[in-house]
């Protein structure tokens, strides 16, 4: 398993096992808090056009991280990985009543699928492959993504 390093701006990569130039665009949303939110959107190249990949179970198309205002505590984060020649998007969300204290983290692993069979359904979508919650507690959600040994054990 290897993280796909996404830099700010336009990133060209292959998302659906073809040699086309798909896009991952990373930008920042600054809402005048201590930590601007990172926003990531994905586009699949189809001939001369692009199809945007929606965020699952949502009506938005951009993945945003989330930190507590005026704090370095990260509540929600995500990263893109390459695993067995497939792209996996892993999101992490801090769970619990007191988000300022160390809490378990819920991990959701998504795989990108292609479907052109159902009218009204996007041709590309992130589908949940698995979810789990850590037994250990973390101060920030991204700490789980930095724990490479743990990530490899759950994949």
Image (spheres, helix red, strand yellow):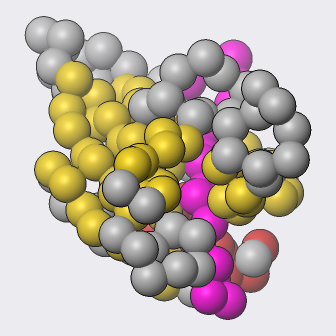
**One can see residue 110 in this view:** no
Q: Is residue 155 magenta?
A: no
When the figure is inspected, residue 71 is found, relative to residue 106, above or below; the finding is above
When the figure is inspected, residue 37 is found, relative to residue 45, above or below; the finding is above
**Residue 105 located left or right of residue 9:** right
- Looking at the rendering, the stretch of residues picked out in magenta corresponds to 83-99
When the figure is inspected, residue 28 is found, relative to residue 13, above or below; the finding is above
**Residue 87 located left or right of residue 44:** right
**One can see residue 31 in this view:** yes
**Residue 78 located left or right of residue 66:** right
Residue 129 or residue 104, whichever sits in front: 129
Residue 102 or residue 44, whichever sits in front: 44
Residue 37 is drawn in which quadrant?
top left
Q: Is residue 93 magenta?
A: yes
**Residue 105, image x and y in percent?**
67, 45
- Residue at x 65%, y 21% (from the top left corner): 58
- Residue at x 82%, y 31% (from the top left corner): 119
């Amino acid at each position: 398993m290897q993280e796909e390093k996404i830099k700010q701006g336009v990133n060209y990569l292959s998302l659906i096992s073809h040699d086309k130039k798909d896009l991952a665009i990373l930008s920042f949303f600054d809402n005048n808090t201590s930590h601007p939110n990172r926003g990531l959107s994905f586009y699949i190249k189809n001939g001369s056009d692009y199809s945007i990949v929606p965020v699952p179970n949502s009506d938005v198309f951009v993945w945003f991280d989330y930190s507590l205002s005026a704090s370095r505590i990260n509540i929600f984060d995500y990263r893109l990985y390459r695993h067995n020649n497939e792209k996996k998007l892993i999101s992490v969300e801090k769970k619990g009543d007191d988000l300022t204290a160390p809490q378990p983290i819920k991990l959701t692993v998504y795989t990108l699928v292609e479907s052109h069979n159902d009218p009204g359904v996007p041709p590309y979508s992130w589908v949940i492959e698995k979810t789990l919650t850590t037994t250990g507690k973390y101060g920030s959600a991204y700490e789980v993504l930095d724990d490479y040994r743990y990530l490899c054990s759950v994949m």
